[in-house]
Image: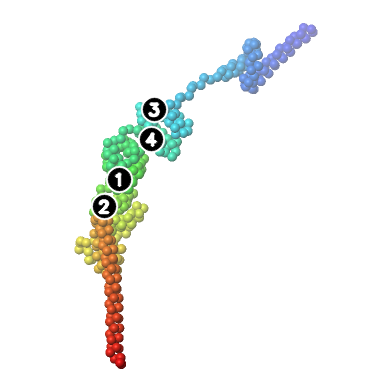
Amino acid sequence: QQRQQQQQGQDGQEGQEFQGCGASTSVATASPFLATGNPLLAGMMGGNPLLGAGNPLLAGMVGGQHGASEPANEEPKDLIDPEVRELGDYFNIEERWVVRLNDVIKKRQDTKGQDLAKLYEVLERARSPTGLLTVKIGEMECGQFVGKIKPDRMVEKLARKFKLDEHVTSRLTELAVRRKATKEEDLDRLEQHLRHCKRPSAMATLLASKLLEGEADELPDLAEAEVLMEKFKLDEDARSKLREIVEKRAADKAEVLAQVEKHLQTSTFPSAMLCRIARPIIEGEKLPDPPERSARQSGGGGDRLNPVAVERRSSGADGGRGRDRERSRDRDKPRYDRDRSRDRERCRRERSRDRDRECREGREGRDAHDYRDSRRDSREGRDGRDGGHRPR
């Protein structure tokens, strides 16, 4: 009986130890972060290797804790190029765009100096340097950005002829570089447009931007329009309007110019007529055909009539027709000669009015004097007759 009781006691002790080991294993399995978040448990296992040997799962979790506790060796960040950093600080560019510009410049080391010089030039005139820089970075990534280079000879000649600004010259240089295949044609047609505009620098910038941004494949040719300008001797305002018509209606240029010519042929004042019909044509409206010429002038020669001239000439007399002819001749003269002739005509009219006034005043004076003399003579004669019949 004693032996049986001792054997039962030993079996109970072994069962309790087994239950304790199983409980600790289940706790560690249920909570994998227990060992990791408990440095005391790790220390106990370090001081008692048998504890880890008895529970391999617990030993693995503690080993994972040591591995996780070691700091990861992070790679150092890429350094920003000093020149790129200087540009960002000068224009107060956001950091993320400075980093992106630095990445792009690394791929363009051959043209780094030219690219940064061009960026300084264009960002100096920008209202929002950061916004414009984002556009230029996109052009660099697409391979369309052109750094600061020496101007082309044709561009320099064009700039001297029309006194273009420096930034406009730079823009035209970029146009010549990016469109090498059509450089001569682009610059020749650009010169045509600049001849007939009032602000060459602004017009050159606008037309170059259209070509560079793909809004237009080419500039419209003004050769046919210049023929009309010379034929009807249009003034500066009318030439500018005709250039704008050709630019806006380049798709149906031939039809539009034929319609304009019809109206100018029937007009006494072609420049004024063109300025009047320019806006509807630019907006895409189709004008009705002008009225036919009068029968009196259908045989050729002389001025052609428009509705305003018909009304004026039908209501006026021969003197009115003569004045219209004189005005037409004056209009055909150069502007300087027209101004001089008008000044002479004005002085001639003023002198004529002065002579008429002097003559009228002299005539009125003579009439008054003659009237007084006649009154005096009649009064004296009456007094003499009365004196002859007076009794003595």
> Which structural element holds mark 2?
helix
Percent across and percent down for residue 187 are 28, 41
Sequence order check, earlier mark of 2 and 1: 1
Judged by depth in the image, the label closer to the viewer, 2 or 3, is 2
Q: Which residue is mark 4?
A: 121
Closer to us: 389 or 21: 389
Inspect the image, locate mark 2, and give the three-letter code of the amino acid beneath it: Met
Inspect the image, locate mark 4, and give the three-letter code of the amino acid beneath it: Glu
Q: What distance separates the C-alpha of mark 2 from that of mark 3?
A: 52 Å
The residue positioned 27% from the left and 61% from the top of the image is 347
Q: Tag 2: Cα neighbours inside 10 Å, few (<14), some, or many (≥20)?
A: some
**Left or right: 67 as drawn, with respect to 373:** right
Q: Which residue is mark 2?
A: 229
Q: What distance separates the C-alpha of mark 2 from that of mark 1?
A: 15 Å
Q: Tag 3: Cα neighbours inside 10 Å, few (<14), some, or many (≥20)?
A: few
Could you tell me if the residues under marks 4 and 1 are in contact, i.e. CB atoms within 8 Å?
no
Q: What distance separates the C-alpha of mark 4 from that of mark 3?
A: 21 Å
The residue positioned 28% from the left and 89% from the top of the image is 388
Percent across and percent down for residue 128 are 44, 38
Sequence order check, earlier mark of 4 and 2: 4
Q: Which residue is mark 3?
A: 107
Sequence order check, earlier mark of 2 and 3: 3
Sequence order check, earlier mark of 4 and 1: 4
Q: What distance separates the C-alpha of mark 4 from that of mark 2?
A: 39 Å
Percent across and percent down for residue 338 are 26, 56
Q: Which residue is mark 1?
A: 194
Judged by depth in the image, the label closer to the viewer, 4 or 3, is 4
